[in-house]
């Protein structure tokens, strides 16, 4: 993602959206995804809440009903790591909607409790957080309304996956070569990581040190966001957002702020006024300036 040190608090005072603006959120039965659905619903958008487990998705819908926020929210099951589930989602979506405006790739997984770094599930982590989000995005791209001022992808990423965490010079050179970056290059890096895991040399190969499989999955997602941002410049805005250390099940409930706080920041980026719309940026929640968002 493009790098700069400017601090910016996106404003949602310019309301450009309506109930005809459609947002899709993955992994939205709990945590930041669920909080983001609530936020979008409160702001008056039409939202598609998705969850890999149908019963958890329906429970989330029930909670929204209790809050009086279910009116413009629809639910459909979606496991981003399952191509059949993606395909069923696309068929269902096409049957009820012509197009959509905002995709938030929020779903992700980490099998490591805080402080641990096992690579036992590295394939699943990469398969979900990178390939799952990529495959779902690829499937949905043709259904964007493709209005330069409205179409947005927000990838919920992590600072753990920024390029400075990668010490492997060969891999860093590949991901840092923005001009030549492609899905193929990203796959080369991801495959090299999985090979290092298979051959048990990942600890000394210069990969990120914390939650290594998760961090590599987010490195790949950030790189893919850059590829898309260039490819769809002027058609679809593509940005990343790191919510910071947030109290969700991924962090065993620990964190500096709530999922609702993180969702408020994510929504502010997803709903940037058209005249301020950016692409190819990495936004991160900051705990040092009262929740302001910095463009790293
Ligand atoms: N919390 C933090 O401190 C933090 C920091 C940086 C970045 N993030 C990012 O923020 C996003 C949201 O995480 P969170 O903290 O809200 O975690 P969370 O509470 O664990 O929520 C993750 C969501 O993703 C879903 N999910 C996992 N695998 C999926 C799949 N294959 N298909 C569809 N959905 C799937 C989970 O569903 P189930 O309930 O079925 O498991 C759950 O709904 C993630 O992208 C995460 O990497 C979080």
Image (cartoon, rainbow, N blue to C red):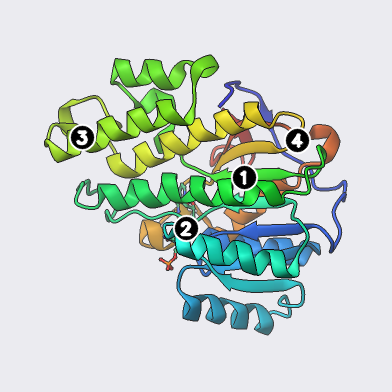
**Up-down relation of residue 190 to residue 4 (above or below):** below
Which residue is label 1 attached to?
154
Which residue is label 2 attached to?
80
**Up-down relation of residue 55 to residue 43 (above or below):** below
Residue occupying image coordinates x 84% and y 64%: 19
Q: Position of residue 160 (x, y in %)?
A: 40, 37
> Observer-nearest residue: 184 or 10?
184
Mark 4 or mark 3, earlier in chain: 3
- Neighbor class of circle 4 (other Cα within 10 Å; few <14, some 14-19, many 20+) is some
Mark 4–mark 3 Cα distance, whole angstroms, equals: 36 Å
Which residue is label 4 attached to?
235
Secondary structure category for the residue under label 4: loop
Q: Quadrant of ligand 1?
A: bottom left
Foreground: disc 1 or disc 4: 4
Q: Is residue 27 visible?
A: no
Q: Do labels 2 and 1 touch, CB within 8 Å? A: no
Q: Is mark 1 within 8 Å of ligand 1?
A: no
Which quarter of the rendered picture does the C terminus lie within?
top right
Q: Do labels 3 and 2 touch, CB within 8 Å? A: no
């Amino acid at each position: 993602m493009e790098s700069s040190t400017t601090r910016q608090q996106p404003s949602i005072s310019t309301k450009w959206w309506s109930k005809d603006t459609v947002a899709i959120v993955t992994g939205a039965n709990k945590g930041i995804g669920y909080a983001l659905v609530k936020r979008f619903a409160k702001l008056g958008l039409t939202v598609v809440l998705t969850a890999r487990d149908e019963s958890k998705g329906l429970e989330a819908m029930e909670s929204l009903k209790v809050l009086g926020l279910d009116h413009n929210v629809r639910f459909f099951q979606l496991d981003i790591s399952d191509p059949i589930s993606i395909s069923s989602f696309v068929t269902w979506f096409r049957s009820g909607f012509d197009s959509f405006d905002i995709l938030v790739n929020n779903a992700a997984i980490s099998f490591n409790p805080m402080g641990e770094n096992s690579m036992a599930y590295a394939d699943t982590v990469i398969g979900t957080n990178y390939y799952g989000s990529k495959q779902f995005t690829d499937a949905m791209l043709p259904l964007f309304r493709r209005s330069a001022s409205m179409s947005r992808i927000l990838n919920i990423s992590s600072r753990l996956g920024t390029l400075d965490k990668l010490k492997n010079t060969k891999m860093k050179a590949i991901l840092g070569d923005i001009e030549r970056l492609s899905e193929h290059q990203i796959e080369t890096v991801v495959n090299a990581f999985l090979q290092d895991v298979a051959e048990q040399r990942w600890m000394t190969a210069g990969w990120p040190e914390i939650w290594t499989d998760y961090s590599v999955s987010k490195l790949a997602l950030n790189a893919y966001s850059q590829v898309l941002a260039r490819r769809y410049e002027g058609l679809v805005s593509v940005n990343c957002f790191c919510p910071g250390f947030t109290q969700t099940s991924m962090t065993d409930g620990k964190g500096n702020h709530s999922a609702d706080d993180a969702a408020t920041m994510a929504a502010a980026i997803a709903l940037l006024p058209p005249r301020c719309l950016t692409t190819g940026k990495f936004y991160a929640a900051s705990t040092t300036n009262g929740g302001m968002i910095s463009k790293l």
